[in-house]
Amino acid sequence: MMSQCHVNNETRIRAFLLLGLSNIRIVQQLLFGIFSLIYVFTVMGNILIIIIVTTESKLCSPMYFFLRHLSLTEIFYISVTVPRMLKDFVHHDKCISFVECATQLYFFCFLGTTECFTLAVMAYDRYVAICSPLLYTSIMTVCIRIVTGTFLIAMFISIGQITFVFSLPFCGPNEIDHFFCDLLPVVKLICADTYTNEITILLYGSLVIFAPFVLILISYIKILAAVLGIRSSTEQHKAYSTCSSHLTSVSLFYGTAIVTYLRTKSSYTHKGSKILSLLYSVLIPMLNPLIYSLRNSQVKTAIKALFKIKV
C-alpha cells in the first residue's frame, strides 16, 4: 500500500501521504493517548447535551433545538478527522487514497459549513428572543425549516467546491503536510494553474464563514443596543447570560476559521495551519459541551437532575 503513495513528478497520482503531526514514535504514542481522550470526551459530552435537551421538558425552546443540532454536528465533525489521525499514530501506513481524501475533505467542508450556518441561526434566535420577545415563538417555529435549509445549502456548495478541486490534475509530489485532507494543503499539490481555484476558495470562505459572521455581528450589535436600553441591571445580566455561551463558541470557531480559510495558498504555512486546524476541528468541539453546560443555568440544573436520577 505504501508503494502506491510514492510517485515521480510525471505520474498522475491516485493516492496521498499524510505526514501528520509528528514522525517521532514516542511523540506519536503520546499524541494518540491525548487525542483518544479528547475524542471520547467530545463525543460523550455532546451526546450528553443531546440527551438532556431531548428529555428535559423545560428545555423545549428553539434555542435548545439549535443546541441539539449543533452538538450532533460536532460529533460528526470531529469524527471526520480524529479517527483517521489516531489510526496514523499507530500505523506506519499513512497513505490515503484519492477517493478517501476527497470524501474526507467533502464531509469536513460540509459539516464545517453546517456549523457556521447553525451558529448564525442561533445568533438570530438570541436577537429575536431579546429584541422581539412577544414574536419569538411565532418567528422561531420555522426553526426546523431553517436547519433543513442550511443543511441542504451546505451539502450542495461543498459538493461544488470539492468537485472543482479534485477535477484538476495531481502529478506529484503527493505528500500532504497535515493530519487530514484540508483544502489549502490539497490545492498546493495541484500541478496546474490554481488561480481560479484559489478565488473559488476565497468566495467559498466568504459565503460560509464571513457572511454568517457578519449576520452574527449585526445580531449582537442590535442585541447590545437593546440591552443597554434596559434600566434594570438584573434584566441586563439575564440578557447577557443567555448570549454568553453562544458568543464564546462563535469567537473561538470563527476566529480560527477566518484566519485559516480567508487567505491564498501562497500565505499558507504548514506549522501554523496545523495548530489552527487542531483548534477548530478538535479542541472547539470538545469545549462546546463545557461552554453550553457551565454557562447555562438551565442546562446545569438538568445535568444535576439527570445524575441524581441515575444515582
Image (cartoon, rainbow, N blue to C red):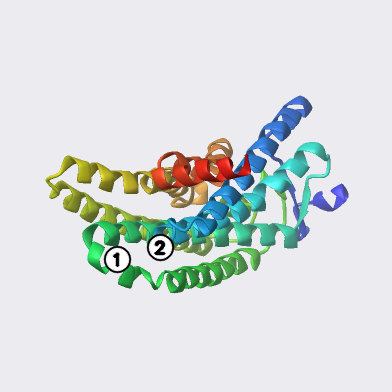
In screen coordinates, is 161 left or right of 231? right
The answer to whether residue 282 is visible is no
Q: Say what amino acid the circle numbered 1 marks.
A: Tyr
| Relative height, residue 105 to residue 156 (above, below) | above
The answer to whether residue 222 is visible is yes
As rendered, which of 152 and 104 lies closer to the eye?
Answer: 152
Q: Residue at x 61, y 49 (%)?
A: 78
Neighbour tally class for label 2: few under 14, some 14-19, many 20 plus, Cα within 10 Å: many
In screen coordinates, is 45 left or right of 121? right
| Relative height, residue 158 to residue 266 (above, below) | below
Disc 2 element: helix
Q: Say what amino acid the circle numbered 2 marks.
A: Pro
Mark 1 and mark 2 in contact? Answer it, CB < 8 Å: yes
Q: Which residue is the site of mark 1?
A: 136
The disc, 1 or 2, on the residue closer to the chain's N-terminal end is: 2
Q: Which residue is the site of mark 2?
A: 62
Query: Which x, y percent locates residue 89?
Result: 76, 37
